[in-house]
Amino acid sequence: MPGVCVDMSCSTEKKGYYREDDVQEALIRSHIRFLKAAINYYLCDECGEYHLTSQGGLHPLLNDPKVQTQIEREQREQEWTARYNRR
């Protein structure tokens, strides 16, 4: 994935994202894939990269109706794919 740091040299041991648009996409993807998803992101003072977090308030991006529709649609697609693959 472009813009993702896999070095994990930061003491947080979290995946780092170089660009804000990359971490925003990762935030949305976490809501599609996981029940306990990240709710926000921050710019790390230590490594200068963005990290996802479950701390703090819900990022306003997740309240955007277009984003909510995308998340719901892709969650349904994921659920149907899983059901189909169980056959």
Image (cartoon, grey):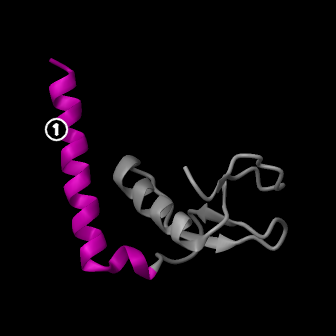
Q: Say whether residue 73 is magenta.
A: yes
Residue at 85% x, 68% y is 46
Q: Say whether residue 66 is magenta.
A: yes
Residue at 47% x, 77% y is 59
Residue found at the very far front of the displayed protein: 2
In this figure, which residue is indicated by the disc labeled 1? 80
On screen, residue 69 versus residue 50, left or right, reads left
Give the vertical position of 62 relative to 78 (above or below): below
Q: For the C terminus, give its image quadrant.
A: top left
Tag 1: residue type?
Trp
Q: Which residues are magenta?
A: 60-87
Give the vertical position of 82 relative to 22 (above or below): above
The main secondary structure of the magenta stretch is helix
Residue found at the very far top of the displayed protein: 87
Give the vertical position of 77 relative to 66 (above or below): above
Q: Position of residue 56 (x, y in %)?
A: 58, 75
On screen, residue 68 versus residue 13, left or right, reads left
Residue at 20% x, 45% y is 77
Residue at 16% x, 38% y is 80
